[in-house]
Image (tube, helix red, strand yellow):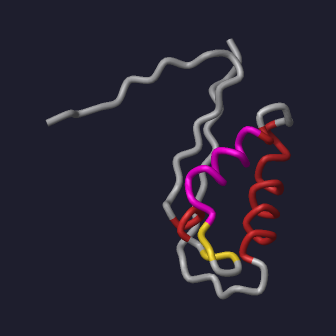
């Protein structure tokens, strides 16, 4: 049984543990899926960390549109202190 996880951090890295709700939420007639989530993060990589929350929230609302929210959605952004 594994008791931990080892990560190698590079300067500027950000980790986003999250629920699967974002990729499973319907927007129109389809789900965003992992490729849509990956594309969102690629678009965020050059933006300051402090604007990520609003950008992620806006992306979700734009994707969901008028569809009912049926999934739990949670993101936690983890950025190590600069050393």
> In the displayed image of the protein, which residue is found farthest to the top?
83
Q: Quadrant of the N terminus?
A: top left
Q: Residue at x 73, y 48 (%)?
A: 40
State yes or no: residue 3 in magenta. no
> Where in the figure is residue 26, as x and y percent of width and height?
62, 76
Instruction: Name the magenta segment's main secondary structure.
Output: helix
Q: Is residue 7 above or below residue 34?
A: above
Is residue 20 or residue 39 the one in the foreground?
Answer: 39
Q: Quadrant of the C terminus?
A: top right
Please indicate whether residue 73 sits to the left or right of residue 47 in the image.
left
Region in magenta: 32-42
Is residue 10 or residue 23 the one in the foreground?
Answer: 23
> Where in the figure is residue 21, as x and y percent of width and height?
53, 67
State yes or no: residue 35 in magenta. yes
> Where in the figure is residue 68, as x and y percent of width and height?
66, 88
Q: Residue at x 59, y 73 (%)?
A: 25
Please indicate whether residue 53 sits to the left or right of residue 1 in the image.
right
> Where in the figure is residue 58, as x and y percent of width and height?
82, 63
Q: Residue at x 70, y 80 (%)?
A: 28
Q: Is residue 19 above or below residue 63?
A: above
Q: Residue at x 61, y 50 (%)?
A: 35
> In the displayed image of the protein, which residue is found farthest to the left?
1
């Amino acid at each position: 049984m594994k008791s931990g996880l080892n990560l190698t951090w590079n300067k500027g890295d950000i980790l986003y543990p999250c629920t699967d709700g974002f990729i499973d939420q319907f927007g129109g007639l389809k789900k965003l899926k992992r490729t849509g989530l990956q594309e969102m993060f690629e678009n965020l990589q050059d933006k300051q960390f402090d604007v990520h929350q609003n950008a992620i929230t806006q992306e979700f609302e734009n994707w969901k549109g008028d569809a009912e929210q049926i999934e739990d959605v949670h993101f936690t952004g983890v950025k190590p202190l600069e050393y």
